[in-house]
Image (cartoon, rainbow, N blue to C red):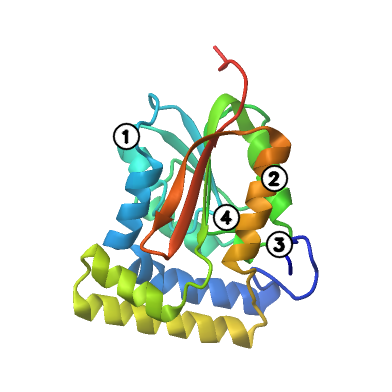
Amino acid sequence: MDGDCSSTEFAVGAPSGAAGARFWERYARVYDRIWDSPLTDAVNRQLWTNLPAAGQAVDLGCGTGLSSGPLRRLGWSVTGVDQSSAMLDRAVQHGRITTALCRDAANTGLPSGRADLVLVSNLLHLTAEPVAVLDEAWRLLAPAGLLAVVWPASGATLGTALRADLRAGRAFGRSLAAAFDRLGVGLAGVRVGARAHSGAAVADVVDAWVAARGAVAVHAGSVFDVECYLVVSKPGNHRA
């Protein structure tokens, strides 16, 4: 793809229709078994270091809310946006989001410039138009607000995810069970035609988008060679 994530070379992202709904319902049932882990905790620690005082956050493609749950515990109000009602139901049940919004992450209908923080975690590689999601995040963000983006590292595989789980301190049995769950979800996705952009392609698009918007880098890095993250600030004086 040569870094062009707007390409329509293949069908990317959430399968649609009845088959898509069944796929996401299945994934929602095992999502926490896979990702509620020391690995996710390690990513969250990187993202939410030195956060400003609690405010308004939007989590685009929130899933079951594993990335925004720590924000809630810090007193943030979080609007979780996802196209899967099954994922949103679990996010609400676990108290990881304040408000659930079943919408397209690229077209939320939320007011502009009101969010102190917008999170886009492990969504861009599953989105046909990643730039549209980033543009929506930027629209929602208040001046001086923070945008946090997470995506799979280039070359990440089931094997690297298993090794990352173990390195992060997850018990062997649970790490192995998560690996089998990942495999099952992946096979189910293949059956309904889901595919993803490569981590390298997403990184290229994020870098180009950040430069074009004049976003101010706060910090960036990778965790166990599985997840990449970037936090940027929107220029301007924060709203009163």
The residue that mark 4 highlights is: 82
| Image coordinates for residue 221, horizontal then vertical, percent | 44, 50
Between the C-alphas of marks 1 and 2, the distance is 30 Å
How far apart are labels 1 and 3 at the CA level? 36 Å
Q: Which residue is farthest top?
A: 240
- Mark 3 or 2 closer to N-term? 3
Query: Residue 66's image quarter?
Result: bottom left
Q: Residue 138 vs residue 185: left or right?
A: right
> Does residue 108 show up?
no
Which tag is nearer the camera, tag 4 or tag 3? 3
* Quadrant into which the N terminus falls: bottom right
The image shows residue 99 at horizontal and vertical percentages of: 49, 42
Residue 25 visible in the picture: yes
> Which residue in the structure is indicated by mark 3?
3
Image quadrant for the C terminus? top right
Disc number at residue 209?
A: 2
Q: Quadrant of residue 46?
A: top left
- Numbered marks: total: 4
**Residue at left 63%, top 74%?**
20
- Graded by Cα atoms within 10 Å as few (under 14), some (14 to 19) or many (20 or more), the crowding at tag 1 reads some
First in sequence: mark 1 or mark 2? 1
| Mark 4: amino acid | Asp
| Residue on which the image places disc 1 | 74
